Amino acid sequence: MDNIEYIEIIDFATTNSQSAINSIPKHLELMESNLAGKLAGSKINTMNKLRRLYDAMDKMSAYLDKYSACKSGCSNCCYYPVTISDIEVKYIEKNEHLKRARVIPKSSKDKYKGAACTFLKDGKCSIYSSRPFVCRHMLSMAKTSKVCEPKYAFDYTLPLIRFDGFRSAYDLIKIESGQEINIYDIRDIFYRKY
């Protein structure tokens, strides 16, 4: 991809992102912006709070789907670093009936560059309903998924829609979980079985 093509992709993604933001219905906008406050005042446990956050993010993604290059069968972002917190590790263990690795190695940003996520099977996420926050937050507003291809993962950046309400809710849940707030790459926690 040359610089001119990249600039055209970024220009489209920027304009498309703004159109998408401007079109979000009020009820979804309020859901996103008020979620952290609602969860903070709730007596439900952190696992259920995480489920509510994920459900809200899925509703927003379903609305924004018409603006996004992300479609079923596209797995480009599954070759990027897939960060996961302790509470999400527990969530996946509980909902997918899996066990984490006993020894967690130190990870680096480039360690898994170009390596598929542990849970990518036949081009689709095998734990889609339990996928972590970072996977739900990744939503390309480009015309095509070309710029998302793994070979460009660290060379180009793409404007993403910021959902500060969702981010605040996620941070709140991590803190309320009472666990350490470690961030790992999912490949260090759940090994790929071949």
Image (cartoon, rainbow, N blue to C red):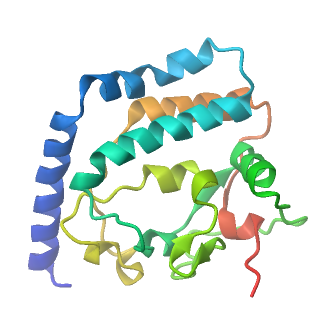
Residue in the foreground of this view, choosing between 159 and 42? 42
In the displayed structure, 101 sits above or below 96; it is: below
**Residue 2: % across, % down:** 16, 84
Number of numbered discs = 0
Quadrant assignment for the C terminus: bottom right
Establish if 136 lies above or below 106. above
Horizontal side, residue 184 vs residue 56: left or right: right
Residue extending furthest right?
102
Q: Indicate whether 72 appears above or below 182.
A: below
* Percent coordinates x, y for residue 59 in the rendering: 41, 39
Left or right of 96, for residue 16 = left
Q: Quadrant of residue 6?
A: bottom left
Give whichever of 165, 122 is nearer the camera.
Answer: 122
- At 65% across and 63% down in the image, what residue appears? 185
Please report the residue visible at 43 percent of the width from the left and 19 percent of the height from the top.
34
Residue 153 in the image, given as x and y percentages of width and height? 40, 74
Snapshot quadrant of residue 189: bottom right
Residue at x 82%, y 61% (from the top left corner) = 98
